Image: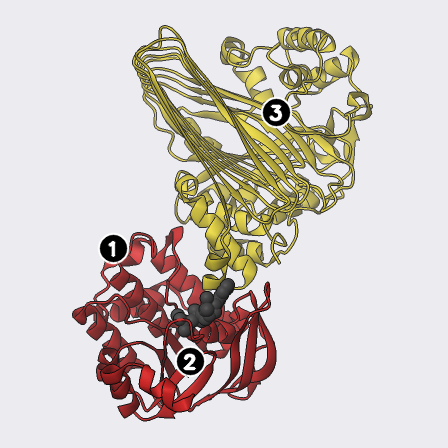
């Protein structure tokens, strides 16, 4: 079986994958899968909200929750404070629900899975073994696995199409499934936690998401359990004019640990597409969550045509004492990025960390950063942000560090470095610092540098071509953040850094 | 091997002529030394041969084994076998020395259509070569040249040269700032690479390096030209009398 032979080399991120990625000179994921889709009519209104809820076979309380959110959204204005500009989005000219027709009934065996869907996974570089599991190939769970395991949940346009390693996770007591399944199977958990970190009315995009989210991932790790493998979600926008609104809910109960990775791609299109996700993480006492993102949405072409508009609300709530969260993100894609993963440090001695690489090339605009909200005593946070701008791109770091009156003896350290490639791009750093007690301390360091011609010449004299040289220097600049990623993805991220900067010099 | 004819070079940005007709041929298997006062154009010659931006060749040619160097990109010259040990090696923060070396070695192999070295083979070779240059594991892991002492930087250049096995090696004041022991290490590194198929152009101010790396030919460069060429005795003459006599003699 050819598929099985390939499993060997495709597992994890091996040289083969890396080479394959390295070969591609433009946006690698810019193809579109020609699958028969089922769409809801364009636009958003209470009927569409009800339809989405119905398609997901949701209980009444969920439908009501969505409708309330929709009502709220209609009274809200799109924010405009970020340092990004884009044509006005017509929210009524989007599809809010699309799913592969073949997924109307969940596949029970490989024969029932649309082969085009499988081909999509393969192009996405989802390890073959996981593809088989996603596709429900019998016995795939028992095939030998090299290296560490990663359980994958794949979201294709609006619906989750399958989750791997279910059985092993269940044995550990970990729930990892699509959010629609969680709403049906674990309503008590969803009711308790959904919207508890990002309230329905939090912001324009989050509120819209609350009304129309179609699917996403759900994780629950019970008390004292160390999740036996990395969990991962691949998001893929495929259908045209379709917004993607996923909802992710992660709950780490007392003393548990989980590491979660999301990866995202989209086809190359002239028309911009909307992505407005919400991620909520709840971390109880002594629990720890690592959330890593490798975001590679289509960034639009050199003139700024097309691309994904990425408006994302991500927030972690360290509810218990000594809870810990670490956000790591590598943002290379999207035409417009508006994203501030945040940490609410409520529990005493809780800790939040944020490591970020944001690359903007050509006409990309990125306005990203983080918020560290210190509420509890002796809380600590650390921010390491590496912004890289090339072409005519604008890259803004916006960070809020807030020490509340009760957050005595708390600490924040922020390091914010910008690297410019060429002289038509820009980097901006906008720190907001509020300290409302006198025992806390906030440190902020910022640097801006240029890729140095002498460094490039040195690399080239040793035989590297210009792009390889830039990639090497930039990867060196990002090292602190790359090191924070799970090993499997650090390699992938390095290659992404290289690919997204191609054509930025010379 | 390396043939430079009537090479004229000016700065790209301003109207300043730096090389004013350099003629020089380095044969395979030979070591040539270039000495000369500061500002005479020695580093410029090494940069122009390796393809650094900022210079304009207004006349003349430079070939390596018959191949025109001046038309090639720096990395193409490197793949063709041109190596420059920098007078001031550059720091690259965050990039491990080993990663840098491996990327360089594999880039050149790829450019020449050879297979890349596996991580295991590469490690084996690096460790052996590093050891003879007294470069320890720690130095291999540290970011390229960052926080290296002067001597460490120069030894690191020689390690890169040893790994890349170039045809034509140019060393620009590799001995400057080295103590006697470090200089010996560097000289041994160079001598280990001496080979029938390889040429060397050693730029230096001091006879003491040439005590260890015995040159076949010594050139004196002044004001953008090679003004005198001779055997090893020419270096001794400079050591004893400085440049004044020679310059007066050719003026
Ligand atoms: N990029 C440059 N910009 C301005 N002047 C330069 C540049 N490169 C070389 N020069 C000048 O050219 C002359 C030769 O310099 P160089 O080649 O470094 O000499 P050497 O290595 O023999 O000491 C000097 O006068 C130096 O100032
Ligand atoms: Mg010099």
In the image, B154 versus A66, the foreground residue is B154
Local secondary structure at mark 3: loop
Task: Please tell me which of labels 1 and 2 falls first in the chain.
Answer: 1
User: Chain A's colour?
Assistant: yellow
Marks 1 and 3, Cα distance to the nearest angstrom? 44 Å
Callout 2: few (<14), some (14-19), or many (20+) C-alpha neighbours within 10 Å? many
- Tell me residue A419's x, y (percent): 51, 43
Contact flag, marks 3 and 2 (Cβ < 8 Å): no
Contact flag, marks 1 and 2 (Cβ < 8 Å): no
Q: Identify the residue under disc 2.
A: B222
Asked if residue A360 lies left or right of residue B197, the reply is right
In the image, B70 versus A113, the foreground residue is B70
Question: What colour scheme has been applied to the protein in the rendered image?
Answer: by chain
In the image, A194 versus A373, the foreground residue is A373
- Report whether the residue tagged 2 is closer than 8 Å to ligand 1: no
**Any mark on residue A169, and which?**
none
Are labels 1 and 2 on one chain? yes
Marks 3 and 2, Cα distance to the nearest angstrom? 68 Å
Asked if residue B155 lies left or right of residue B2, the reply is left
Local secondary structure at mark 2: strand
Residue drawn at (47%, 72%) of the image: B44
Residue drawn at (59%, 64%) of the image: B14
Q: Identify the residue under disc 3.
A: A277
The chain in red:
B
Residue drawn at (77%, 25%) of the image: A89
Callout 1: few (<14), some (14-19), or many (20+) C-alpha neighbours within 10 Å? few
Local secondary structure at mark 1: helix
Q: Identify the residue under disc 1.
A: B138
């Amino acid at each position: 079986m050819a598929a099985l032979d390939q499993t060997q080399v495709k597992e994890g991120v091996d040289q083969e994958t890396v080479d394959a990625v390295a070969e591609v000179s433009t946006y690698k994921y810019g193809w579109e899968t020609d699958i028969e889709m089922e769409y809801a009519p364009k636009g958003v209104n209470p009927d569409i909200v009800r339809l989405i809820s119905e398609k997901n076979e949701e209980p009444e309380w969920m439908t009501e929750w969505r409708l309330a959110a929709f009502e709220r959204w209609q009274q809200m204005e799109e924010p405009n404070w970020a340092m990004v500009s884009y044509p006005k989005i017509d929210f009524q000219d989007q599809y809010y629900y699309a799913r592969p027709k073949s997924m109307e009934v969940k596949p029970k065996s490989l024969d029932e899975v649309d082969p085009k869907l499988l081909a999509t996974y393969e192009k996405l570089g989802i390890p073959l073994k996981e593809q088989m599991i996603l596709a429900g190939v019998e016995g795939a769970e028992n095939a030998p696995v090299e290296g560490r395991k990663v359980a994958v949940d794949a979201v294709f346009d609006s619906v989750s199409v399958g989750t791997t390693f279910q059985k092993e996770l269940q044995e550990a007591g970990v729930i990892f499934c699509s959010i629609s399944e969680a709403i049906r199977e674990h309503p008590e958990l969803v009711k308790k936690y959904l919207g508890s970190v990002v309230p329905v009315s939090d912001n324009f995009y989050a509120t819209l998401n609350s009304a129309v989210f179609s699917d996403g991932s759900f994780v629950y790790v019970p008390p004292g359990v160390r999740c036996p493998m990395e969990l991962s979600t691949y998001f893929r926008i495929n259908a045209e004019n379709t917004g993607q609104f996923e909802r992710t809910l992660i709950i780490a109960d007392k003393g548990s640990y989980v590491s979660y990775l999301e990866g995202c791609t989209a086809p190359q299109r002239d028309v911009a597409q909307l992505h407005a996700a919400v991620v909520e993480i709840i971390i109880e006492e002594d629990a720890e969550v690592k959330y890593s993102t490798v975001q590679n949405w289509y960034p639009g072409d050199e003139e700024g045509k097309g691309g994904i508009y990425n408006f994302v609300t991500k927030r972690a709530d360290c509810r218990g004492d000594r809870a810990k969260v670490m956000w790591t993100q590598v943002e290379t894609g999207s035409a417009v990025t508006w994203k501030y993963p945040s940490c609410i440090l409520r529990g005493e001695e809780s800790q939040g960390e944020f490591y970020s690489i944001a690359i903007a090339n050509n006409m990309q605009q990125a306005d990203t950063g983080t918020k560290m909200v210190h509420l509890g005593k002796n809380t600590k946070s650390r921010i390491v942000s590496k912004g890289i701008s090339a072409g005519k791109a604008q890259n803004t770091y916006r960070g809020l560090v807030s020490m509340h009156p009760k957050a005595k003896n708390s600490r924040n350290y922020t390091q914010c470095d910008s690297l410019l490639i060429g002289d038509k791009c820009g980097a901006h750093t906008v720190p907001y610092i509020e300290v409302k007690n006198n025992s806390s301390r906030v440190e902020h360091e910022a640097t801006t540098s240029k890729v140095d011609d002498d460094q490039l010449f040195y690399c080239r004299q040793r035989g590297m071509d210009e792009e390889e040289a830039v990639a090497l220097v930039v990867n060196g600049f990002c090292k602190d953040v790359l090191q924070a990623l799970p090993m499997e993805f650090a390699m992938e991220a390095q290659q992404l850094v290289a690919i997204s900067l191609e054509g930025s010099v010379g | 091997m390396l043939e430079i004819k009537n090479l004229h070079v000016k700065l790209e940005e301003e109207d300043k002529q730096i090389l004013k007709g350099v003629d020089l041929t380095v044969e395979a298997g030979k070591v040539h030394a270039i000495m000369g006062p500061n500002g005479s154009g020695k580093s410029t010659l090494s940069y122009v041969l390796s393809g650094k931006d900022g210079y304009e060749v207004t006349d003349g040619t430079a070939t390596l084994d018959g191949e025109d160097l001046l038309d090639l990109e720096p990395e193409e010259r490197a793949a063709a076998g041109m190596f420059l040990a920098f007078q001031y090696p550059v720091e690259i923060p965050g990039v491990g020395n080993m990663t840098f070396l491996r990327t360089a070695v594999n880039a050149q192999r790829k450019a020449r259509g050879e297979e890349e070295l596996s991580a295991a083979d590469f490690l084996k070779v690096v460790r052996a070569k590093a050891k003879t240059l007294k470069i320890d594991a720690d130095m291999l892991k540290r970011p390229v040249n960052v926080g290296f002492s002067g001597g460490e930087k120069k030894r690191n250049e020689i390690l890169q040269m040893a790994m890349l096995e170039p045809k034509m090696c140019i060393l620009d004041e590799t001995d400057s700032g080295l103590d006697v022991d470090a200089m010996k290490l560097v000289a041994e590194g160079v001598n280990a690479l001496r080979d029938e198929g390889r040429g060397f152009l050693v730029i230096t101010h001091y006879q003491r390096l040439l005590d260890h790396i015995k040159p076949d030919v010594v050139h004196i460069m002044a004001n953008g030209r090679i003004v005198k060429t001779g055997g090893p005795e020419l270096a001794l003459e400079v050591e004893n009398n400085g440049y004044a006599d020679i310059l007066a003699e050719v003026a």
